[in-house]
Amino acid sequence: MNVLEKVVTLNELRKARNELPEPVGLVPTMGFLHEGHLSLVKRACEQSASVVVSIFVNPTQFAPTDDLDAYPRDLERDAALLQEAGAKLLWVPTPEVMYPPDFQTWVDVEKISQPLEGEKRPGHFRGVTTVVTKLFNAVQPQKAFFGQKDAQQAAVIRQMVRDLNMSVEIVTQPIVRERDGLAMSSRNTYLNPAERQAALVLSKSLAAAESAYEAGERDAQSIRKIMEDIINAEPLARLEYVSCADFETLEELEIISNKALLSMAVYIGRTRLIDNCVLG
Ligand code: PAF
């Protein structure tokens, strides 16, 4: 049976990490694991001799108005799932381990962090890139695994790794969906049954836009309108943004001629959900 070691402090992490067979793969998470996370761990196990998973609900990527304490947590269940999935080391740092009182260094990726999630959640990516840098420095993995569900996060992290010459390979794994199309997310637990049903407008609007693209539509505004109309027709949904952007730069497109990222953020009741798909 696989044995999962759990550590908290930086010293414990470094000691346990140094004893792991190389190459090491890292799966950074905020816990409350679902099939999407487990698909990352599975891929990491296939591509690494040892897999380290971090669980840390990172306060610096939440806005002051977000309810950080309400973020779902279940460490015992997460550890059991990770042990079964084949992870070797679980790092669960406390906020004090990650951000000691005199903490004052930040990592900020400029341009690609600005639109979409960056515009709606100021400071979010600064928190993500800072904590991911700390995780990379502490664990020193050869590869790190991220979900395509957070498409902009993956793009920002790839940019950071290139810009700062970090010697880690970023692997992204496709979105894992429920049978009815809802993208898996820890936030789905906030949805009541009516909201859970309404949340299907995200994947439905992406599917409609994808069909239009496959039928030959290349006008980005028409594609955005298809998604908007479907979301706006759902009474429990409140659209925050839809985007049809260049896959690499995340700049909004007029005409789709290369790989494009369709993405959106939608409130279903009080729960903010995101989803995306890639065209071309
Ligand atoms: O995607 C997440 O769960 C988080 O943003 C990450 C990458 C673990 C950083 O806190």
Image (cartoon, helix red, strand yellow):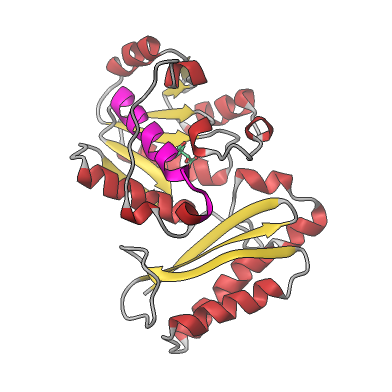
Viewer-closest of 42 and 193: 193
Taking 196 as reference, is 156 left or right?
left
Taking 55 as reference, is 169 left or right?
left
Taking 241 as reference, is 134 left or right?
left
Taking 163 as reference, is 244 left or right?
right
Q: Is residue 58 visible?
A: no
Residue 166 falls within the magenta-colored stretch? no
Identify the residue shown where x is 72% and y is 45%: 190
Residue 130 falls within the magenta-colored stretch? yes
Residue sticking out furthest to the bottom: 216
Residue 120 spot, x, y in % from top left: 53, 54
Identify the residue shown where x is 55% and y is 71%: 206
Residue 84 spot, x, y in % from top left: 53, 30
Identify the residue shown where x is 58% and y is 26%: 80
Looking at the image, residue 22 lies above or below residue 262: above
Identify the residue shown where x is 51% and y is 26%: 83
Looking at the image, residue 3 lies above or below residue 116: above
Residue 231 spot, x, y in % from top left: 66, 71
Viewer-closest of 153 and 119: 119
| Corner quadrant of residue 181 | bottom right
Region of the chain picked out in magenta, as a range: 120-139
Q: How many marks on residues?
A: 0
Looking at the image, residue 122 lies above or below residue 277: above
Residue 132 spot, x, y in % from top left: 37, 35
Q: Is residue 27 visible?
A: yes
Main SS category, magenta section: helix
Q: Where does the C terminus fall, quadrant-wise?
A: bottom left
